[in-house]
Amino acid sequence: MQRTMLKAKLHRVTVTQSELGYEGSCAIDEDLLDAADIHEYQQIDIYNVNNGNRFTTYAIRGQRGSGMISVNGAAARKAQVGDILIIAIYASYTEAELETFEPRLVYVDANNRIKRQGFRIPLQSV
């Protein structure tokens, strides 16, 4: 049996751009992609803390070190500059893989700079 589990998340990133005219996707600072092990063109789920919108798109590389989170195309109707997002990816794991499974969690500051990384959700954050 396989179970779909949270593989990684970028927690409470701030939208820096919203580009309705762009073809689609979400551009994410390459440092954040690396930290969360998100690959370019990988499917991502986005949860908008400000308005409750939840949507699926794919990641593209943003300029490394820029703090960029740009929601593009039709998804730009679901997030605006300044909104707080949670960006998550999921993967399927076997029961054997789950014995050592831990999600990769990336926490950022107000400028989308990494302030902490972890593999367990701290109880005080729940």
Image: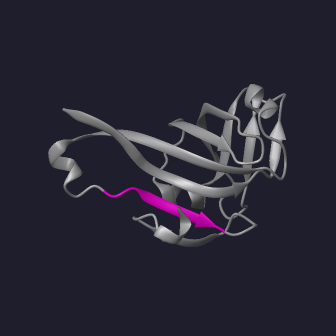
Q: Is residue 16 above or below residue 58?
A: below
Toward the bottom, the furthest residue is 115
Q: In the drawing, does residue 22 fall left or right of residue 91?
A: right
Rendered location of residue 84, percent (x, y): 73, 53
Q: Identify which residue is drawn at 15% across, 47% down.
A: 96
User: Foreground residue, 1 or 31?
Assistant: 1
Q: Based on the displayed image, in which of its 4 quarters is residue 113 positioned?
A: bottom right
Q: Nearer the viewer, residue 55 or 65?
A: 55
Task: Name the magenta segment's main secondary structure.
Answer: strand
Q: Which residue is painted at 42% across and 41% down in the image?
A: 90
Question: Residue 26, percent across and down?
Answer: 67, 40
Q: Is residue 106 left or right of residue 24?
A: left
Seen from this angle, which residue lies furthest left? 96
Q: Which quarter of the rendering shows the N terminus?
A: top left
Q: Toward which corner of the image does residue 63 lie, by quadrant? A: bottom right
In the foreground, 124 or 117 = 124
Tell me which colouring the rendered structure shows: one colour
Residue 116 within the segment the image draws in magenta: no
Q: How many dots with numbers?
A: 0
Expressed as whole percent of the image width and height from the top left, the position of residue 120 reads 40, 65
Identity of the residue drawn at 22% across and 58% down: 100
Please name the residue shown 19% across and 55% down the image: 99
Image location of residue 47, percent across then percent down = 64, 42
25 to 98, vertically: above or below:
above
Start-end of magenta stretch: 102-108
